[in-house]
Image (cartoon, rainbow, N blue to C red):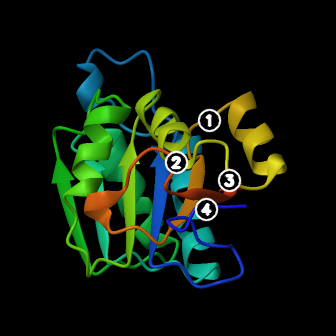
Amino acid sequence: MTSPAVTSPKRRPRHTLLLARHAKSKWGLEVDDHDRPLSGRGRRDGVALGQFLAGNGYRPDLVLSSTATRARQTWQRAVLGGAVAGEVRYDDRIYEAWAGALAKLVRRLPDETGTALLIGHSPGIAELVRLLAGRRGPESAWTQLEAKYPTSGLAVLHTDADWAGLEPGAAVLVDFVVPRGT
């Protein structure tokens, strides 16, 4: 039996939280880690992420993205794939943040934000899924997520909790996908 704060995947949730790890970045450049751009594969995967979002009816009211170049470019490429959002904010607190810090950012979202997309980094994004969903949801999604949360990985969480009341275990993981471009 699920807690009252967790919605059934068959019922429309109060809030949807999309947690994306940025697309594949380019290595071997003489730039600071924060400034690494997407690789060719990352650019293709960013478009595929946008196609997945648009094709599945996910239109975030708010996108919160790390200020790292690769995270910004992931959203820019997603837009080329058809993704749209009501508002986009870049926040330097997401770069190198752990799950607790990311959860604080999510809890500060306005409650009228129905769907939010957070674009961040490993391991914070994966840890946030584990923290908020507490192993609730389809075993197939958890198996894939636990095997690896690769670049462009996207977790879809549903909750009936207010954003401010989004405590550990108050969400359910309803899907985990890794969009790949061709």
Q: Nearer the viewer, residue 25 or 106?
A: 106
Q: Secondary structure at mark 4?
A: helix
Q: Nearer the viewer, mark 1 or mark 4?
A: 1
Q: Position of residue 109 (x, y in %)?
A: 22, 64
Badge 3: residue crowd in 10 Å (few <14, some 14–19, many ≥20): many
Q: Secondary structure at mark 3?
A: strand
Q: Nearer the viewer, residue 165 or 14?
A: 165
Identify residue type, mark 1: Pro
Q: CA distance from mark 2 to mark 4?
A: 30 Å
Give the quarter of the figure containing the N terminus.
bottom right
Identify residue type, mark 2: Gly
Residue found 24% across the figure and 45% down from its top? 104
Q: Nearer the viewer, mark 3 or mark 2?
A: 2
Q: Which callout, 2 or 4, points at the residue further toward the start of the chain?
A: 4
Badge 2: residue crowd in 10 Å (few <14, some 14–19, many ≥20): some
Q: Which residue is mark 2?
A: 169
Q: Position of residue 102 (x, y in %)?
A: 30, 41
Q: CA distance from mark 1 to mark 4?
A: 14 Å
Badge 1: residue crowd in 10 Å (few <14, some 14–19, many ≥20): some
> Going by the image, does 56 lie left or right of 72?
right
Identify residue type, mark 4: Ala
Q: Which residue is mark 3?
A: 176
Q: Nearer the viewer, mark 1 or mark 3?
A: 3
Q: Which residue is mark 1?
A: 150
In terms of image quadrants, where is residue 85?
bottom left
Q: Which callout, 1 or 4, points at the residue further toward the start of the chain?
A: 4
Q: Which callout, 3 or 4, points at the residue further toward the start of the chain?
A: 4
Q: Which callout, 1 or 3, points at the residue further toward the start of the chain?
A: 1
Q: Nearer the viewer, mark 3 or mark 4?
A: 3
